[in-house]
Image (cartoon, rainbow, N blue to C red):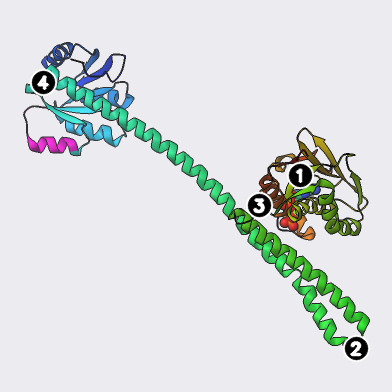
Amino acid sequence: MNGPTPVTDRPIEILLIDDDEDDYYLTKQVLSDISHASFNLQWIWKFEEGFEAIRRGEHDIYLLDYRLGEKSGLELLKEARALGCKSPIILLTGQSSTEIDLAAMDAGATDFLEKSRLEAAVLDRTIRYALQQRQYETQLEKKVAERTEELARANEALRLADKRKDEFLATLAHELRNPLAPIRNALEIMRIAADNPATIEKARLIMERQTHTLIRLIDDLLDISRITRSKLTLDLDLLLVREIIDLSLETSQPLLDKAGITLDLEMPERELKVRGDRLRLAQVFSNLLNNAAKYTKRGGRVCLKVTQSDSFAAICVQDTGVGIPPEMVSQIFELFTQVDRSLNRSQGGLGIGLSLVKKLVEMHGGSVQARSEGIEKGTEILVKLPLIEC
Ligand SMILES: Nc1ncnc2c1ncn2[C@@H]1O[C@H](COP(=O)(O)OP(=O)(O)OP(=O)(O)O)[C@@H](O)[C@H]1O
Ligand SMILES: [Mg+2]
């Protein structure tokens, strides 16, 4: 017959707290009859010393006599539990009494044993069960602690995301409100200057420009909401990188010109072909060029360089602008992240552009990376798109 599985490999440390020396010898004898496990039995007969020993928690298990001189084992048990002691404590009772047994369980005894029936098989089973129970509790406590830690971390991430969303809402309200003031003013001007065509044309241009800003803002929002719900589909075509760049420049060149920034374009001799959505890829590069224009001072330069890197088309947009602090470089692709909102206020924007870039590039099987030597040291964004060889 297989013996019971031992709970530990080393001897089991047992402390008997009992005011009767005979009980000590009896317990020692009974333990020595348990052949498949080894025990170290220690004996203490005073309540206070017993309490101290339990407090130190150096034993695996405690056997506690119900009678301890003036006091009772039950009191000691209660005090030990009140102190937070979680070790198995078995109460040894004089004779079987339901009342005492119940009181023992209530006070937190792991088990109780009738002294007169103390024999090897019973003690063995009780010790084993109590130790296994404790082992199980410890594992459970560990799991609960790990889970609590995980939840705390998830909670913190949620809190940060929530904070970012709150900040985003404030920015959004601001960004949506911004174009409305000039539109309202332009309407007023049109009313007053009804018979002055030149003024009316100026007002109309203001309204056109501001409406365009609003539409772009809302389109970005719709795009990001489609992407996060996996509702955005790509209209795939075989494309030349050159035509994508040309298309993006149709949108961005006026902005670069207006910001007084020179663009250097470096294209490879050989045409590079990729499979992708023409408008979406043009959106990627115009977002990057718009950022370069937005975050570079007048007189600065932007270089758009296309090269082949193994089986990828590498498109690098480099500027001589304000740069990005090192700790933010990895975060700028996250939705609603802006390096310095107070600074960006004057620049406008919602912190969506780069997040869209990353998602769109990844949907094309590509990757995007940012690099900056730091503040005022310029920024470089590298997009890689898988090449089609044909
Ligand atoms: N070329 C760049 N140089 C310096 N900082 C940049 C550059 N591109 C992006 N950033 C920083 O990264 C942040 C996130 O860029 P992203 O394009 O996502 O948002 P945005 O430009 O602020 O607003 P949006 O693009 O939604 O109009 C910017 O707010 C800016 O702080
Ligand atoms: Mg942007």
Q: Is residue 217 left or right of residue 70?
A: right
SS majority, magenta? helix
Q: Nearer the viewer, residue 384 or 127?
A: 384
The number of numbered discs placed on residues in the rendered structure image is 4
Marks 2 and 3 sit apart, C-alpha to C-alpha, by 47 Å
Q: Which mark is residue 274?
A: 1
Residue 97 highlighted magenta (yes or no): yes
The answer to whether the residue labelled 3 contacts the one labelled 4, judged by CB atoms less than 8 Å apart, is no
The residue identified by callout 2 is 195
Q: Which mark is residue 335?
A: 3
Q: Secondary structure at mark 4?
A: loop
Q: Residue furthest bottom?
A: 195
Looking at the picture, how far across and down is residue 31, in whole percent?
A: 17, 14
The residue identified by callout 4 is 118
Q: Within 8 Å of ligand 1, the CB of disc 3?
A: no
Q: Which residues are magenta?
A: 93-105
Which mark sits nearer the N-terminus, 3 or 4?
Answer: 4
Residue type at mark 4 is Leu
